[in-house]
Amino acid sequence: MPVVDILPYRRTKYITLGPILNSEAFINGNYHIIENIFLDQLQYNYETTFNDWLFLVYRDQKTIKLIQLYKEERVEAEYAYNSHKWVLPIPGL
């Protein structure tokens, strides 16, 4: 009989985000939304958190394209947060 390796039980941590009153129609709006989520609401550290983590962002095709555009604009940024290498945009199906 094969042995099944079962993961231990633990509660999933979740956070309910507050309202975000920015438009996703333009690059600047998407930038402000990501800043609002990760810096203001989740309160991640600007200088250290984004060096070691990769965050998956599921959005529609237009928003994914805008995120890719501002990632290309900020390739030479000094801090990891400003370069947005930590964002992996994934189109939602």
Image (spheres, rainbow, N blue to C red):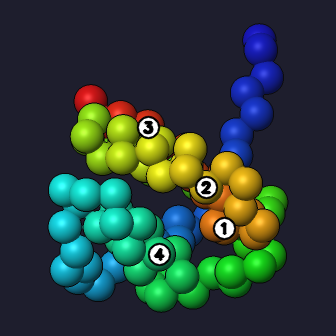
Q: Can residue 9 be seen at all in this image of the molecule?
A: no
- For the N terminus, give its image quadrant: top right
Disc 3 versus disc 4: distance between alpha carbons?
18 Å
Does residue 56 appear to the left or right of 86 in the view shown? left
Per the image, the residue denoted by label 4 is 35
Closer to the observer: label 1 or label 2? 2
Q: Are marks 1 and 4 in contact (CB under 8 Å)?
A: no
| Element at label 1 | helix
Per the image, the residue denoted by label 1 is 81
Disc 3 versus disc 2: distance between alpha carbons?
19 Å
Does residue 86 appear to the left or right of 41 in the view shown? right
Closer to the observer: label 3 or label 2? 2
Q: Earlier in the sequence, mark 1 or mark 2?
A: 2
| Circle 4 residues within 10 Å: few <14, some 14–19, many ≥20 | some
Per the image, the residue denoted by label 2 is 74
Please name the amino acid that badge 2 sits on. Answer: Arg
Q: Can residue 19 be seen at all in this image of the molecule?
A: yes
Q: Earlier in the sequence, mark 4 or mark 2?
A: 4
In the rendering, which numbered label is found on residue 90? Answer: 3
Closer to the observer: label 3 or label 4? 4
> How far from the left and from the top, in percent, is residue 89?
47, 42
Q: Earlier in the sequence, mark 1 or mark 3?
A: 1
Please name the amino acid that badge 1 sits on. Answer: Tyr
Residue pictured at 36% horizontal, 47% vertical: 66
Residue pictured at 19% horizontal, 56% vertical: 25
Disc 4 versus disc 2: distance between alpha carbons?
14 Å
48 or 65, which lies in front?
65
